[in-house]
Amino acid sequence: MFRISKMTDYGTLVLAHLAEMGDQPTAASEISGRTGLGAATVSKLLKSLARADLVTSRRGATGGYRLARQPSEISAADIIDAIEGPVAITDCAADGHGCDLEAVCGLGSAWQQINSNIRKALREISLTDLKGERPIPTEMPLLPMKQILHKDALR
């Protein structure tokens, strides 16, 4: 089964809360209290989100965390990459892949195209969409599987 982890789900919840707070810096303890997530989990998530430049932090009495960009500029792909690393549905779809069977397999290009389409769909969904502030497109223009498996479509 292809699923995102609970940590990515929780990270999205943290980002959604920060989006609600706008430019107001919010303490990790407040985020924990308002989201129901444990303080250690929130701290771990905020570190990952800060490393990915999705949130900024400021120390001090008036400090806290806030979004580094507008919610409409943060994609689902950005969130997943920050918490889990880049999406790769198979090893051969990952960047810098190196498979012992690549020379005889012939499936790597198809998996890479499928992975590319998934990433494209994730990039088109923003934090604003995830929060339900605007409808998520029900149909994404993706290549049909027949085209993906046809060698000419992969060039």
Image (cartoon, rainbow, N blue to C red):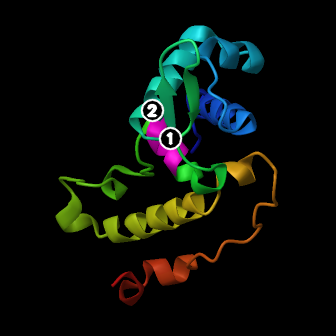
Q: Amino acid at mark 1?
A: Leu
**Does residue 43 appear to the left or right of 98 in the view shown?**
right
Frontmost residue, 143 versus 59: 59
Q: Residue at x 42, y 84 (%)?
A: 150
* Residue marked by disc 1: 54
In the rendered image, the vertical position of residue 118 relative to residue 22, given as above or below? below
Assess whether residue 118 is covered by the magenta stretch. Answer: no
Q: Residue at x 61, y 17 (%)?
A: 27
State the image quarter where residue 139 is shown. Answer: bottom right
Secondary-structure class at tag 1: loop
Magenta span: predominant SS is helix
Frontmost residue, 96 versus 103: 96
| Magenta region, residue range | 78-83
The total number of labels drawn is 2
* Residue marked by disc 2: 50
Q: Residue at x 44, y 29 (%)?
A: 48
State the image quarter where residue 62 is shown. Answer: top right
Query: Badge 2: how crowded within 10 Å, few (<14), some, or many (20+)?
Result: some
In the rendered image, the vertical position of residue 42 relative to residue 24, given as above or below? above
**Residue 5 in view:** no
Q: Residue 75: x, y in percent?
A: 57, 53
**Residue 152 in view:** yes
Q: Residue at x 49, y 33 (%)?
A: 56
Outermost bottom residue: 152
Q: Distance from label 2 to label 1 (Cα)? A: 6 Å
Q: Residue 83: x, y in percent?
A: 48, 34
Frontmost residue, 140 versus 62: 62
